[in-house]
Image (cartoon, rainbow, N blue to C red):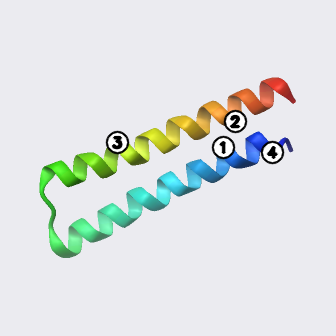
Amino acid sequence: MPPLVILGLGLMVVSCVVSGFDAIRTMRHGREPERRMRAFLLAAGLLVGGGVMVAVGLAIG
């Protein structure tokens, strides 16, 4: 498996961890919408970036 694919899959896993951490923290403490939106955009960016890396890695390799 090309290294770019492995890195992309790793970013996708990190996206899930960020999203889960935000959900658990919200359940425990409650958070204002601005912070939730920031965490959502971070997780979404990591997911899209990982998907692009996987696609490029598979196209090259």
The alpha-carbon separation of the residues under discs 2 and 4 comes to 9 Å
Label 3: how many residues lie within 10 Å, few (<14), some (14-19) or many (20+)?
few
Q: Which residue is mark 3?
A: 41
Q: Please tell me which of labels 1 and 3 falls first in the chain.
A: 1
Q: Pick the quarter of the image with the N terminus.
A: top right
Residue depicted at x 15% and y 62%:
31
Are dots 4 and 1 in contact, CB under 8 Å?
no
Label 2: how many residues lie within 10 Å, few (<14), some (14-19) or many (20+)?
many
The alpha-carbon separation of the residues under discs 2 and 1 comes to 5 Å
Q: Please tell me which of labels 2 and 3 falls first in the chain.
A: 3
* Mark 4 residue element: helix
Q: Which residue is mark 4?
A: 3
Q: Which residue is mark 1?
A: 8
Q: Is residue 49 above or below residue 10?
A: above
Q: Please tell me which of labels 4 and 1 falls first in the chain.
A: 4
Label 4: how many residues lie within 10 Å, few (<14), some (14-19) or many (20+)?
few
Are dots 2 and 1 in contact, CB under 8 Å?
yes
* Mark 2 residue element: helix
Label 1: how many residues lie within 10 Å, few (<14), some (14-19) or many (20+)?
many
Q: Please tell me which of labels 2 and 4 falls first in the chain.
A: 4
Which amino acid type corresponds to the residue marked 4 in the rendered image?
Answer: Pro
Residue 17 in the image, given as x and y percentages of width and height: 48, 61
Q: Please tell me which of labels 2 and 1 falls first in the chain.
A: 1
